[in-house]
Image: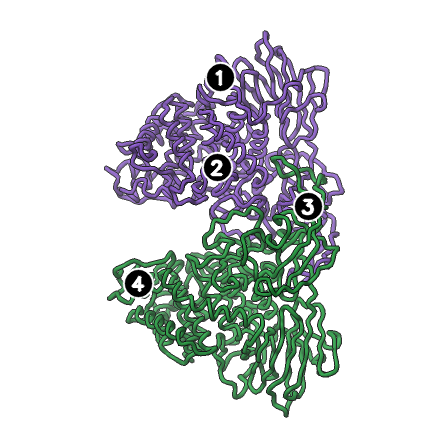
Chain colours: A purple, B green
Amino acid sequence: MPRTRSTQPAAPSRATPSRATPPSGAPSPAGPVRPGPGARAALRPAVAEVEDGFWHTRREVNARTSIPQGPGLLESAGNLHNLRLAARAESDTAAEGTFQGAYPFMDSDVYKWLEAAAWQLAQGPSARLAADVERIIALVAAAQRPDGYLNTWFQLVRSGERYQDLRWGHELYCAGHLMQAAVAHHRATGRRELLDVARKFADHIDSVFGPPGSGRRIDGIDGHPEVETALVELYRETGERRYLDLAGYFVDRHGHGLLGGEAYCQDRVPVREATDVEGHAVRQLYLLAAAADLATETGEEELRAAGERLWRAMTTTKTHLTGGLGAHHDQEDFGDPYELPNERAYCETCAAIASVQWSWRMALLTGEARYADLIERTLFNGFLAGVSLDGERWLYVNPLQVRDGHTDHGGDQSARRTRWFRCACCPPNVMRLLASLEHYLATGDDDGLQIHQYVTGRYTSGPIAVRADTDYPWHGTIVLTVEETPTDRPWTLSLRVPQWCRAFRLRAGESAHDQTDAPVEAGWLRLERTWTPGERIVLELDLEPRLTAADPRVDAVRGCVAIERGPLVYCLEQVDQPGGGLDDVVLDTTRPLAVKHRPDLLGGVTTVVAAGRRRDLPGAGWWPYRPAGDGSPAAGEPVELTAIPYYAWANRQDGAMRVWLPVS
Amino acid sequence: MPRTRSTQPAAPSRATPSRATPPSGAPSPAGPVRPGPGARAALRPAVAEVEDGFWHTRREVNARTSIPQGPGLLESAGNLHNLRLAARAESDTAAEGTFQGAYPFMDSDVYKWLEAAAWQLAQGPSARLAADVERIIALVAAAQRPDGYLNTWFQLVRSGERYQDLRWGHELYCAGHLMQAAVAHHRATGRRELLDVARKFADHIDSVFGPPGSGRRIDGIDGHPEVETALVELYRETGERRYLDLAGYFVDRHGHGLLGGEAYCQDRVPVREATDVEGHAVRQLYLLAAAADLATETGEEELRAAGERLWRAMTTTKTHLTGGLGAHHDQEDFGDPYELPNERAYCETCAAIASVQWSWRMALLTGEARYADLIERTLFNGFLAGVSLDGERWLYVNPLQVRDGHTDHGGDQSARRTRWFRCACCPPNVMRLLASLEHYLATGDDDGLQIHQYVTGRYTSGPIAVRADTDYPWHGTIVLTVEETPTDRPWTLSLRVPQWCRAFRLRAGESAHDQTDAPVEAGWLRLERTWTPGERIVLELDLEPRLTAADPRVDAVRGCVAIERGPLVYCLEQVDQPGGGLDDVVLDTTRPLAVKHRPDLLGGVTTVVAAGRRRDLPGAGWWPYRPAGDGSPAAGEPVELTAIPYYAWANRQDGAMRVWLPVS
């Protein structure tokens, strides 16, 4: 019987976290977000090798299809063409030929793909991928100006206007993605070609930007945060403190009206004073990821408190059930509290990715399980819906509803999957997260190993190695085997009990315990003991499908429920329902939900079958409003409804879709 | 006792309408939409002089504040500056100085203001207004190029690029507003200065645009319909058939991909083939107004059928309770059927105006009362909310909800009233509709007079004059006195019984009749007799406040009702409710609604007082979704709710607002 740490309270969130030193002897794992040696992280990333199961499949598709197709898509979209043109130019003047692409941040797609490819190369060698990476890095290096500046839009189209359109120019944004790619490439391969390019550009930026009185020419910020978190990573990889300071400067200068004070650009209110997330969702989240990085590296309490406050504001009032973020197509921004529309949910795929990145940093900073809860929900739903099952088509926006009779005008914001976008930020962003996903799954500290997300594979932190075998999220059983352990001292295996989980069982050897025996402290089930190699623990999470309702202030889903099972949000797609569309469907909540495993469907999913009715609709007439009480009868023809996981929608024929279902 | 025409069925909507000849001896009233002598209109506009009451007050504010402030606002926004610059230029080349304003259609604001001022001058002389009009017309005339072309954006900024950006250039759109202003000025004052400018431009356009094979240089349409309906009016005013043919050509060429096939530009599907309204709402509605004009002038059945079909599609599935139209901020467009959001309702003020213009033309074409029903609803709600009670501030979008904690970023799409907009299309559009409102209230035909909207004043059609006295919409009693009538032959007084009306009484002399005695034929109460001067009829419409529900497919308002009284939609504003915001308010539908006349409030309104509760909200926690059935208790502290007419919202302090109220 495992001992639990029920007598020892979880650290309160406001307490200064104990400093987690790297487990002795552990190699620095080649992944993103590696807090520096002096960082005040409560937890440090551990390595998880994903060997089989749900995420393994998705990562295989990413490795075999999405990433290898990247260079061809970047070629046909013009991104590589732009680099070649810029490399040919003698100076910052327009070269022969024309910049291709609709946006000034075309370069960032290349950098995000390079980052994805680098993380992929860390999984194992691939001659073809390595050659592509080498070729494209050479292009990037050749396009760099002698002084370190690098941005093909400005070099080719707006020569002489460097840093004169910080609101929309995306120069520092692109630089940030270059730095992240360079860090990834260096960590994954040990090679310096791209890191040298990134450092040279970072040094150039550092020579130009700084606060009044610093002697620098420009006191400014980029309209799209990204360089901030990238500079922290560059600091981590190089040990160059100037990069951390520059990141801090950029974070500090948001909210002071340098770009006119727009919320869109994260320029309305300083991060430390903000009380709610606002403006362009991805910009907000990248900025908050940087704030969390800085709080981790500097130990600053005010930034940490701001992160905790804003994260709670976001999750409590501005997060869709899928983890999706962003309520408005217009401006791609957060809406008001509880403004969470369905068909017009924006939920940009990049915002889901940014949310994972921010929450992961908050998890490292605070050690709290809630961040992993949101990461899990986001990964399985709002994020994963962004890429098709075959890895070849994408969604930029991720609505929670498509109506009967929906007219889709195509374009980047289409509710139909697209091969590539004019603004192609999302696809390579998905690629880089999937390729580095094993680095967001577990952590270690001086007390032991914390498993945040359950996969089949091997979790390693210092001298500890734990193997997990599971068919999660289809089945709730997770078999954990201690493979390597010091045998002379106790340590704690911390297992996250998901926020959605209403019941679980824990078995160790012959004994079994339910949650009353194994108390969960703020989401963590703590098992402390001196472990023996080969020792086995079985965690069984109850995956009964459930109906979920929303806070009554979420007007968009009043009178509706959603079907969930485990971490998965479910939806109805028209193609699975007998007899037409979805707008007349009502769920019968008095009848039980049934689970049906369907290996034949959508690459193998567990469906949830529910009882519903097709409601009788009001008759003809030109006015859809009527005296209250004249209501249409709720009853109607019974219909068996088949729900599929939300992440798998839009992989078959076009049609209506609903997450939230009216109840009778 | 009045005879009713219950034995004579209303004309079916598909039947070819009888041709309404102008009542003999009637002067052509100086108003918009005057079907030509050969037109196939079922009805013809009658004159209504608005002398007192609700609309008189609103028109007085328009005449005394809004319109007189126009020239100063057009000056400070740069519109007049642009005309002066263009007038100074020797040719189509950039003059000294810079074009002012953010949009290529700055000229149209001037033209719409001129149209408003012209209709205002038709009400009675004003030396100052006449001087302003004369001065600005002189500016317009001076800016016109010798060949008739006139567009300050292209003359000053994009010289040499005439008609090369039809998708966004708005040249024909501006030309259309010029023509409408010119027609109004000529009708109102008999003066030709502006009409000559408009004709010269129209002739120029006619010399450039035409179908393949016509010998014209360009086969094209403007991205923003407007010139089409304007050309029909120019034809009506001048008798020049070429203008009607040119209007027909432009209408016909929409939907053939000349602008790339976008729904936004009304270029995806030809009008005659369309099955639903789509794309940019104002563009769609101006185009359909032109289609109705053409059907009226040409008698073409196919266009008429398209108008009837599309109007029904719009009202059944895409119209907000307020008559507001347009579901998306992004692209300002119609959404899917039944996609009618509240806080993100777009409901552009211009779309409400365009809806009135289209419906009025359909009413003339068909004679059916339903069009006047929508006009009434739109005028009292979705349209009138666009201007503040003092006539000095405006709403561009007209949401049906503002949340607690709403963050308003200002700008044209703000939920707070604004003095003027960067895109200032709405304010002068409101001015021109209010200044010409008396022309949308009644019609005549060979059978008599039809009263569409009830005001205190005098309705005249040929030899018939009927006086109305009413405090509508605050009270339901309308006293109608026949002032002038032929005494030797019968005619029919047709009174519209509004679609919202559940009960009415009709009194004539000593006798009284309820609706069972006086049958309503498709919205018209027909009173046919040989009338006597001084004869009096009293119509009493039941104004009991009522609760209204929506078709269950309108997801946004599931579980909610709205308060209405007569033609007025009501809303809650935070400032009127005790104890805080609105997001926790639930309406108690078991308790009666009470009416309270409040002469002190908002210029004098009738409020509706309802019983509600402040619901207990879920406790703290970071996730707003919970197992269904764990619901928060519906009960809570009782609260007396005071609802005001929607048109009067946003005239006091900022705060939350709701039209649709959750029910307990």
Residue B424 as seen in the image, left or right of residue B585 = left
Q: Are marks 1 and 4 on the same chain?
A: no
The lab-note entry on whether marks 4 and 2 share a chain reads: no
- Residue A427 picture location, percent across and down: 47, 37
Most foreground residue, A111 or B352 = B352
Task: Return the mark for residue B145.
Answer: none
- The amino acid at mark 2 is Glu
Q: What is the x, y in percent for residue B460?
A: 56, 82
Residue under circle 4? B155
Q: Residue at x 35, y 61 (%)?
A: B78
Mark 3 vs mark 4: same chain?
yes
Q: Amino acid at mark 1?
A: Pro
Helix, strand or loop at label 3? It is strand
Displayed quadrant of residue B608: bottom right
Using the numbered discs, state the Cα–Cα distance from disc 1 to disc 4 in whole angstroms.
69 Å
Q: Badge 3, how many Cα within 10 Å: few under 14, some, many 20+?
A: many
Q: Residues within 10 Å of mark 4 (few under 14, many from 20)?
A: many
Q: Is residue B297 above or below residue B398?
A: below
How far apart marks 4 and 2 lie (CA) works out to 48 Å
**Residue B313 shows in the view:** no
Q: Which residue is mark 2?
A: A273
According to the image, label 3 marks what residue?
Answer: B615
